[in-house]
Every structure is written in C-alpha cells, then in structure tokens.
Amino acid sequence: MKSSIFERMEAHDYEQIYFCQDRTFGLKAIIVIHDTTLGPAMGGMRLWPYETEEEALTDALRLARGMTYKNAAAGIPYGGGKGVIISDPKRGKNEGMFRVLGRFIERLGGLYLTGVDVGTTVEDMDIIRAETRHVVTVSEAWGGPGDTSSVTAHGVFQGICACLEEVYGNPQPEGRTIAVQGVGGVGRALVHALVEAGANVTVADVNQQHVEAVTTLYPQIQVVSPEDIHRLAGDVYSPCALGAVLNDQTLPALRCKIICGGANNQLAEEHHGEMLAERGIVYAPDFIVNAGGIIVGAESLSHGGFHPQRALKQVERIYQTMRNVLSYAQEQQIPTHQAAASLAEQRLAMIQQVQHLSVNNN
Ligand code: NAD
C-alpha cells in the first residue's frame, strides 16, 4: 500500500511542502522544505516534464533531503530544500511563470532560497529576481555569480587532489590518467583545469560539439565512446554527466583507483557505495565534491555582496572536507558515502544542541 504524504514526510522528518499553481502561465510547482536547523532552506529549482504529480513530488522530496546533507557537509548556514516545476524545458517556459513563482517564493519570506538546477538557467533566475531577492545564482547584473559550472568544477578538482593524496601520497594531478564522462559546463571546466595541471585526460560525451570544444583547445586529449569511458584503466574516473552511473552493470567493468566527479547521485543504490569500498576504489561522495555551486550561491548572500575571489577560497575548502571524509571512513572502517552522511548528520546534531542551549539560556 502506498504511504500517505504525511507518512512520507514523517519518515525523513520533512518540515513543509508548498504546492504552487497558476493557470494563466501554466505554473505547477512544488517546494519542499526538508530541514531548517542550519538556516533557511537553500536548493535549486528543477524544471522537468514529470509524467505524474507523484513523480514530481517524489523527486522534490528526495532532492530536498539531499540538499540538507550537501549544505551541512559544505559548512554553510543553510538548510535543505528544493523546488520542482512540472513543465518541458524546451517548450514550457515563459516569463510570467517565473515571475509568478518569484512571488510565491517572496511570500515564504526567506524560508526558501532558490537557484539554477536541471532545466532552469541563470536567465530564469534573473526573472525570479525581479519578484524576490530570495534567489541565488543570478547573473552579475544582479550582483550574483552567474553560471556556477566552473566553480563546481573547481570544487571537483579539489576533490580529485584530495583523493590522489590519499591513494598516492601526492595531490598533484600531473602525469595522472583521468577519464571525464560528460564535457558540458562542469566537465569542460574540469578538463581545462586538469590539462593545465599536467594530467593525461580522456573524455567522452554524447554531444560531438561538446567533445570538439575541448579537443580543439587541447588536441592532446584522447576521446573514447560514451559506452567505454568507465571501463578505462587509470587513476581517476570523473562522472560529470548523469546520475546513477555507478550501478550493477558498470561496477564490474571499473578499472580506476578513484571516482570523483560533479554529477549528482552517482550511486544507483546505497549498496553500490559498499561495493566500491570492497573493491578498494576510493569514491568521493558527489555531494561533497560538487558543492562549489551552492557554496558560491551562499557566498553571494553574505555581507558586502558577492566577491569572486572570496567565493573561490570557500570552494577550495572542499579539499579539506574530502580529506576529513576519507580519514573518518578509514577510522570508522565504513564506506566514504556513509562517512560523508555521518559527518553531515554530526554537524546538524551539533547545531541542534547549540540551539537547544541558547533557548534554555534565555
Ligand atoms: P551540462 O548539461 O552542461 O553537461 C552535461 C554533459 O553530459 C553534456 O555535454 C551532455 O551531452 C553529456 N552527456 C549526457 N549524457 C551522456 C552520456 N551518457 N555519456 C557521456 N556524456 C553525456 O550539465 P553540467 O552543468 O555540466 O552538470 C553536469 C552534472 O553535474 C549534472 O549531473 C549536474 O546535476 C551536476 N552538477 C552541476 C552543477 C553546476 O554548477 N552546473 C552543480 C552541482 C552538480
């Protein structure tokens, strides 16, 4: 029997769900607030042609909870939340839809801060910004960071260095063989950083133009088919395209020592993280190393406005966060994805304790 909405909220202690509807502009959106222990809920707005409302709600619930962990592990003062719009990214967008959504977000009074996600763009966020200031990843014109792919790549690069240090006692990518799956916004910026650092890079993408964009710039880059990229023997496999790429089919074929990439939700199931640990492959949990975008989004709201250099320094903390995850996993003899979740939960518990004490002192 299917669980009721309240049963599903109770299962992972979700705080609130908002359903937003506007007939004129065809807006159907769901905003989920998972946990505001650390501060207002921050998480992007996904626009996707969900086949059913049920599918959209399930995705929003899953993504909002994921943001609680990501934000907690990133050390930023924001809780976890997420929005989804049921629409088609190619045909279903219009200015009115985002303006109305901006008004709904404004009504929440800062409880939820939105940003770019799959299916939405910086331009869409700029439209929302006309109605509410509770939006990050707006363009430079609005004092924001604009497209966050390159800062996300910068964080993934830090994660790769931290894992190389773990495996080889040397964080430098120079001379290492690194396979990058997907050279869109994040993958392309990562490839630039890796090639500049002297790594031997192989790429794969289903979009030939994206492949050419990197090989034109760096002719020394090798290219393989998208079906083969995860099979390459080498130091690092960096998934920067789709989720669920670490699954029953791909795992037996892996021949890398480290997995560290920008794609969200790389583990198809929890037990795939355990299987990687059993095989001695160092896995960098995605929500640890791809937090660059959210760190910069949070930074853009800090006092004095957005400072690119200060933001980059914050993103560089991902190196130490990843080192902490690896040490904790080693100490507790647990897989890295469990170590990362546990460190995030410890930060949430610590802040809850602080809040409890301050209430008693009043
Ligand atoms: P993007 O759409 O710009 O790039 C994705 C690339 O993957 C495209 O070039 C696409 O052609 C390619 N691709 C799709 N299917 C593929 C396949 N089967 N094999 C190989 N390549 C394939 O997206 P992006 O912004 O670069 O994000 C990449 C991943 O990182 C996504 O999972 C995204 O959710 C995640 N992420 C992005 C950010 C950010 O700031 N952009 C932040 C956190 C996480």
Image (spheres, rainbow, N blue to C red):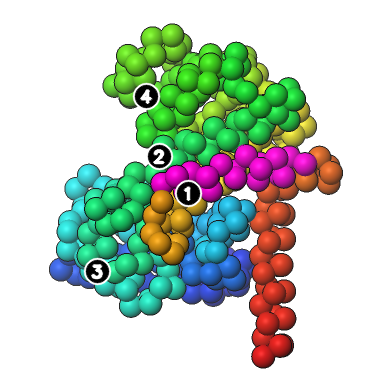
Mark 2 touching mark 1, by CB under 8 A? no
Q: Where does the magenta region start and end?
A: 308-327
Q: Residue at x 71, y 54 (%)?
A: 343
Mark 4 C-beta to ligand 1 under 8 Å: yes
One can see residue 106 in this view = yes
Q: Residue at x 43, y 24 (%)?
A: 192
Few, some or many C-alpha atoms within 10 Å of disc 1 (few <14, some 14-19, many ≥20)?
few
Q: In the rendered image, which residue does mark 1 sit on?
A: 310
Instruction: Work out whether 44 lies above or below 313.
Output: below
The picture places residue 86, in percent across and down from the top left corner, at 31, 57
Q: Amino acid at mark 2?
A: Ser
Q: Amino acid at mark 4?
A: Val
Mark drawn on residue 206: 4
Q: Earlier in the sequence, mark 1 or mark 3?
A: 3
Give the position of the C terminus as an image quadrant. Answer: bottom right
The verdict on residue 303 being magenta is no
How far apart in space, not on screen, are marks 4 and 2 (Cα)? 19 Å
SS type, badge 4:
loop
How far apart in space, not on screen, are marks 1 and 3 (Cα)? 28 Å
Mark drawn on residue 149: 2
For discs 1 and 3, the disc positioned in front in the rendered view: 1
Residue 252 found in image quarter: top right
How far apart in space, not on screen, are marks 4 and 1 (Cα)? 35 Å
- Judging depth in this view, the residue of 245 and 135 nearest the camera is 135
Mark drawn on residue 131: 3
The verdict on residue 322 being magenta is yes
SS type, badge 3:
loop
Q: Amino acid at mark 1?
A: Arg
The picture places residue 56, in percent across and down from the top left corner, at 40, 58
SS type, badge 1:
helix
